[in-house]
Amino acid sequence: MPKTRSTKKKPQERTIPMVWNFPDDLLSRYATNILVQTGDQELYVSFFEIQHPVLLEPGDINKVESVNAECIAKIVVTPERLTLFVDVLQKQLTAFKAKKAQKANGSK
């Protein structure tokens, strides 16, 4: 009886491009506050937009008892993924500040 040789094929590696989809009806909102809460295995990150009260006269501020903060988005993320997000955000913030400083100094 001939011996059969078992060869396991390695999975082929390839790059599959990501297509970033922004729906036409997607709303952009301004996040003025962020709240982070922890769960057992994840973090809950909620973004809020402050709803400023209408003040028509200087004395109206004395009538304000609270200010509403509307939740405009909430994501649930693992600590590992959030660490990657924070790293990317920090890099982009650093690049943004450097570009802004260049413009302030008259450079392009």
Image: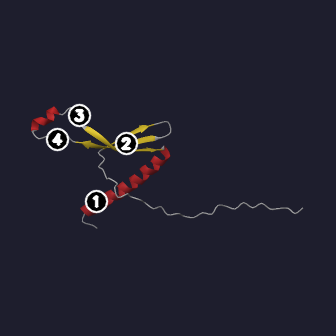
What number is the disc on residue 66? 3
Which amino acid, by three-letter code, is at mark 3? Ser
Nearer to us of marks 1 and 3 is: 3
Horizontal and vertical percent position of residue 18? 47, 61
> Which residue lies under the disc numbered 2?
46
Give the residue furthest to the bottom. 108
> Which residue lies under the disc numbered 4?
54
Classify 10 Å Cα crowding around label 2: few (below 14), some (14-19), many (20 and above).
some
Could you say whether the residue bearing mark 4 is in a helix, strand or loop? loop
Nearer to us of marks 1 and 2 is: 2
Left or right of 9? Residue 102 is: left
Left or right of 9? Residue 100 is: left
Q: Nearer the viewer, residue 15 or 100?
A: 15
Which residue is painted at 50% across and 39% down in the image?
41
Which residue is painted at 63% across and 63% down in the image?
12
Distance from Cα at disc 2 to Cα at disc 3: 20 Å
Of pointers 1 and 3, the one earlier in the residue sequence: 3
Distance from Cα at disc 4 to Cα at disc 1: 36 Å
Which amino acid, by three-letter code, is at mark 2? Ser
Nearer to us of marks 2 and 4 is: 4
Quadrant including the C terminus: bottom left
> Which residue lies under the disc numbered 1?
101
Of pointers 4 and 1, the one earlier in the residue sequence: 4
Which amino acid, by three-letter code, is at mark 4? Val
